[in-house]
Amino acid sequence: MSTQRIHSYYSATVLGDTVYPQLEGEVRVDVVVIGGGFTGLASALELAERGKKVALLEAQRIGWGQSGRNGGQVTGSLSGDGAMRRQLARQVGEQAADDFIWFLRWRGHDIIRQRIERYGIACDLKFGHLHTAYKPSHMAELRRAFAEAQQHGMGDAVALVEAAELGRFLDTPLYFGGIYNQRCMNLHPLNLCLGEARALASLGGLIFENSPVLEICHGAVPLVRTASGCIRADQVLLAGDVYHQLERARLGGMIFPAAGGIVTTEPLGALARQLNPLDVAVYDCRFVLDYYRMTADGRLLFGGGANYSGRASRDIAAELRPCIERTFPQLKGVKIDYQWSCNMGIVINRIPQLGKLSPNVWYAQGYSGHGVATSHIVGEVMARAICGSMEQFDVFQHFRHIRLPLGDKLGQSLLALGMWYYQLLEKLH
């Protein structure tokens, strides 16, 4: 059990890092949430705002996992949207399916922005994102996405950028065009996590760190047990995503870790503005993509690749340096001050998994690398369901999920093989 977060740019620049106590003895609440990342925090805070007495249990520290380590981009991307639309359209019709997918793409932005304003959370919030074409063939995909955004009334927020115009955004020879979206955001995710935790505590929510859950005892009043205490609650929400090993008899074979790497350079000074004049966050159209942005203090934060074997890279900087120098040749030999990895929770069909393990034990997980915004939407959906408003939760019950029957370890190998296949197809086209 760790009492410290990994060494990253985020942990080195954290603001107001409150240390919460370990659970001791017995506690009684309305709802206990397991997991101190965005899903757990968003759900718990929404429940507290609705008047529920909430306790949140985190095995390590608040924001210890993916929520405090990710690239910090809040975009309209949604893994599994094609599969969602097809499955949902058969149940509720094309228009209702389209409306729900669009809700999942953008509701999280409103939640995050309003929460930052309401609770005064300092997390380096910035607006502006560029989705880039890595190959000429990617422009057809981006043109369709641009048309869809216009059809949904986002014409004032988005612009299609042709190759000749890219120099206004980035000083790189790499891309063939893109979509500029002013509604998308980027931020310091760990500071957002900690700000939401402080907001939860201000509403009377109980937060316990370094308190890994050993078991959930189901029943009329479930019991959640740790090594040094327990919590009785009317409802339990399991929100640990890929980092927990609870309830594997039901949840095993459904979600798998993919290790992504991120680095942050030394401060670039005036070069930061030269490379990225409009200070946009960026990612490209590839299946396994690069993503990057400038931090508040002028460093390049760059992430890319994904190791679907479940094993973290030994030298992230060595793996990502060629990608940085290919994107920005001006940064050849730049000093890298921080490097770290994080596990993304990958779902086979890429559709977030929301469900029940028993009448009063719920779970939510699986954002497949697009979790900052989606986790906040899911937090709202889960809080509403726990409070009795099931409409949005019930929509997720239309989705069929794939559970690999041979266990987590073999499932991880099958996932790695599948990802290799898709990456190979992408290189051939």
Image (cartoon, grey):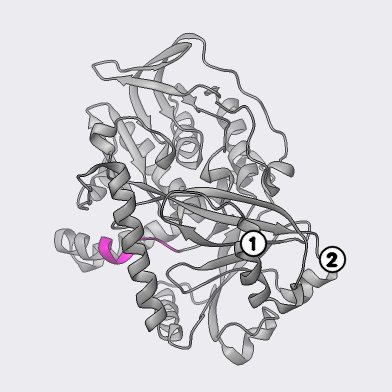
Q: Farthest front residue?
A: 314
- 426 left or right of 277? left
Kindly identify the amino acid type of the residue bearing the numbered disc 2: Gly
Residue sitting at 75 percent across and 73 percent down? 332
* Numbered tag placed on residue 81 in the rendering: none
The answer, for residue 127, to whether it is visible in the render is no
Give the secondary structure at mark 1: helix
- Which quadrant of the figure contains the N terminus? top right
Q: How crowded is the residue under tag 2: few (<14 C-alpha within 10 Å), some, or many (20+)?
A: few
How packed mark 1 is, by other alpha carbons closer than 10 Å (few <14, some 14-19, many 20 or more), is few
Rendered residue at 65%/25% (across/down): 19
The correct choice, above or below, for 253 with respect to 35 in the image is: below
* Relative vertical location of residue 166 with respect to residue 224 in this rendering, above or below: below
| Residue 322 falls in image quadrant | bottom right
Q: Is residue 295 above or below residue 193?
A: below
Nearer to the camera, 187 or 274: 274
**Contact, CB < 8 Å: mark 1 with mark 2?**
no
Residue at image x 38%, y 36%?
A: 383
Q: Residue furthest toward the left? A: 90
Provide residue 239's location: percent of width, then percent of height: 40, 36
Residue flagged by tag 1: what amino acid is it?
Answer: Ala
Residue 284: image location, x then y, percent: 52, 73
Dot placed on the residue nearer the N-terminal end, 1 or 2: 2
Q: Residue at x 60, y 26 (%)?
A: 202
Q: Which residues are magenta?
A: 77-84
Residue 24 in sight: yes
User: Seen from this angle, which residue lies furthest top?
Assistant: 25
Q: Which residue is denoted by mark 2 in the rendering?
A: 269
- Disc number placed over residue 318 in the picture, else none: 1
Q: CA distance from mark 1 to mark 2?
A: 23 Å
